[in-house]
Amino acid sequence: MAESTKTKLNYEEFLKLYDEDTRAEWVDGEVILLSPASNRHQDLVRFLTVILDLYVEKHDLGVIRPAPFQMKLGLSGREPDLLFVAKEHLERLQENYLDGPADLVIEIISPESRLRDRGEKLAEYELAGVREYWLLDPDEKRADFYLLGDDGRYDRRRPQPDGRYRSEVLAGFVLDTNWLWRSPLPPVLSILQELKLF
């Protein structure tokens, strides 16, 4: 369960006091300590990091950063499970945080993060201009995708009936959500072959 500290800190103080070994987020001056991640959560993060990193590198699209890596948005410093920064926004990358919105944020939902990911973070990411937001819930086997419209509001997208979702931000990338619900996850090499990454 996430736990809030009582002491108010500015973002620079937060970065000095809490290093990459501490799972924490900064929200309006308060530090939110996060629960340890589960095996399933970490397996999904690793799986997606490898696939997306190789895809982004092959197509020269930008960079992928898995947690722990902060994304500073106005009054919050969030630590998404994965984020993508497009080549045209690489100047936002600082030494140990992203100064501004990522182009794509992926959150893997756990029971304790469900309300935060679907509520607070959804609103913050929309307001800050995160272009695409993926919410992946392995317990419910549910994937929701949000794409920022011209009006600055998120348009909710669902995968096709076969489970596939075509990313708008990662040009040409198609995620088969069926991969995510398998136990164990499919071998990364077979997915890389399916995506024609080698």
Image (cartoon, helix red, strand yellow):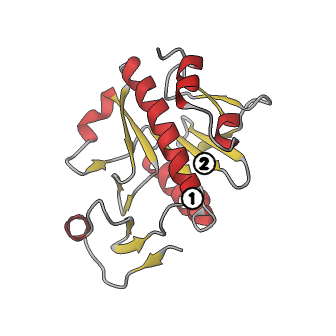
Give the quadrant of residue 179. top right
Find numbered disc 2 in the image and state the secondary structure of the residue it sits on.
Answer: strand
Q: Amino acid at mark 2?
A: Leu
Rendered residue at 35%/20% (across/down): 60
Q: Amino acid at mark 1?
A: Asp
Residue at the disc numbered 2: 135
Label 1 crowd bin: few (<14), some (14–19), many (20+), radius 10 Å: many
Give the quadrant of residue 33. bottom left
Q: Compared to 158, does 26 lie above or below?
A: below
Q: Compared to 182, does 162 lie above or below?
A: above
**Residue 48's x, y, as percent?**
51, 38
**Residue 55's x, y, as percent?**
45, 24
Q: Nearer the viewer, residue 49 or 13?
A: 49
In the visual, does 156 lie left or right of 95? right
Rendered residue at 62%/47% (across/down): 136
Looking at the image, tell me whether mark 1 or mark 2 is earlier in sequence order: 1
Q: Nearer the viewer, residue 41 or 124?
A: 41
Q: Nearer the viewer, residue 110 or 160?
A: 110
The answer to whether residue 175 is visible is yes
Rendered residue at 59%/68% (across/down): 112
The answer to whether residue 106 is visible is no
Q: Compared to 119, does 61 lie above or below?
A: above
Residue at the disc numbered 1: 117
**Residue 188's x, y, as percent?**
53, 30
Rendered residue at 44%/52% (across/down): 80
Spatial CA distance of label 1 from label 2 is: 8 Å
**Residue 84's x, y, as percent?**
41, 37
Q: Nearer the viewer, residue 37 or 149?
A: 37
